[in-house]
Image (spheres, rainbow, N blue to C red):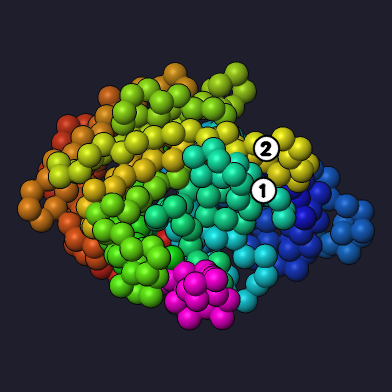
Amino acid sequence: MSYGFPPAKDVYYNEFMGMMAEQSTGAAAGTIRQWLATDGSTTYWYIEAVDNGGTSQPFTGLPLDYYASGPSYLYVKNSWLPSASSLAFILGYPAEVGHLHLDAGSFQINRNGYWLSREAVGYSDSITGPGGVGSVGTDSTWTVNGLIIDNMQLAGSYVEGPPVVTRLDSQPNYVFTSVNLSAAYRAPTSSYTNPDGTARDDNPSVASAVRDYIYVRPLETLVAFDRIATQDPSTVGWPTLAASPASIRKTFLLHFPNNPTIQDSTHVLGVNGTNGTQALRLTMLVPAAQSVPSSVVVNEAMSGQAGDTSPQFRLEESHSGEAQSYLINVIQARDATAPDVTATMTENATSFTITLTHPINGTAVIQFAKGMTSTGGSFGYAASGMPTTLTPLATSVNLTMH
């Protein structure tokens, strides 16, 4: 196991890929050998001794996206250039493995070889807790770019059901997916109980939680669109937690390797890379009926931190005021000196329209249908000017990758 932030040439990766190269054939073997050549490491003698060799195959022959339907992991790139952005969407989780982390629905972003947002890794250790108080384990939802509801995370055991990817589409200019996380927060039949008899692992405030993602390749910009409905816990067997659904907090988490700057009430900027060459900029879009979320940055490092842990800085973006809320966040990866994407939003009775404009790379228009269920929606992009047509978003899971 490799701890922290291991490079691609890490010994464990190299050993694994070396063995995969000799066990594979055709295009798969060629691509693996290209990976080994690119990372610049030396394959171990005991692997080379039984390796018959082979020819490398350029990465450019591969699709930019890959979806592993078993654990529901989606991998996305905007190009095969060394400076490309790469995103990993952990939409579900493997069902039959141990050491499960509560990271369903989260994402990570790497650009030009530097992490701009990723989970705070660790092994059986702790980081600073919610709002900078107490501690949480490194297997918790607080360590990833997930959703916290009523200050509680995804259910740790005895879940009501797994996350379900309901929509997925890979296109030249965008990638779209939607995952229903609702059942993964609930564990009402847990065999472990609290002193009052309630289920230990349950998050009773969650009525539903659905996360939509659209990644716009030409703009290197991700839109996270969260639909969250809350309920009074006392109505589902938690009398001591009675609360108005509108008063329950919903929290969007975003991690930064370095301490980010809260530029104003709706913008946060994080910088990473050699001499700060890479940047991640967050824009919060707020529906007319909702108040601007509150934001706090928490340093996850604790005194006496174990050496196998890599704490970061955690942005906690929290909102309450409605039983049904939307958290809408636009996340741009770019060179630190590159221009910002401007994000604006309008709405009517049935939908939100988000316009993303970059002064060089064009404009995208995204429509999301309102409601707690992910339906409808459309996308359009133009390299110059405004898009003239919008294409409907996929209504099911399309496994064809671009």
Q: Give how far apart the Cα atoms at labels 2 and 1 are.
A: 8 Å
Q: Classify residue 313 as left or right of residue 217.
A: right
Where the C terminus falls, by quadrant? Answer: bottom left
Secondary structure, mark 2, is loop
Q: State the residue position of label 2.
A: 302
Measured as percent of width and height from the top left, residue 68 is found at: 52, 66
Residue at x-position 62% and y-position 65%: 100
Q: Classify residue 132 as left or right of residue 50.
A: left
Q: Which one is nearer the viewer's eye here, 148 or 394? A: 148
Q: Is residue 6 visible to us here?
A: no
Q: Residue furthest left?
A: 349
Q: Mark 1 belongs to which amino acid?
A: Ser
Residue neighbourhood size for the residue with mark 1, other residues' Cα within 10 Å, grouped as few (<14), some (14–19), many (≥20): many
Q: Classify residue 340 as left or right of residue 302.
A: left
**Mark earlier in primary sequence (2, 1):** 1
Per the rendering, the mark at residue 126 is 1
Which region of the structure is painted magenta?
A: 183-202
> Which corner quadrant of the image does residue 369 belong to?
bottom left
Q: Is residue 131 visible to us here?
A: yes
Residue 246 falls within the magenta-colored stretch:
no
Where the N terminus falls, by quadrant? Answer: bottom right
Residue at x-position 54% and y-position 70%: 194
Q: Do the residues labelled 2 and 1 touch (CB within 8 Å)?
A: yes
Q: Is residue 301 above or below residue 172?
A: above
Q: Mark 2 belongs to which amino acid?
A: Met
Measured as percent of width and height from the top left, residue 170 is found at: 37, 58
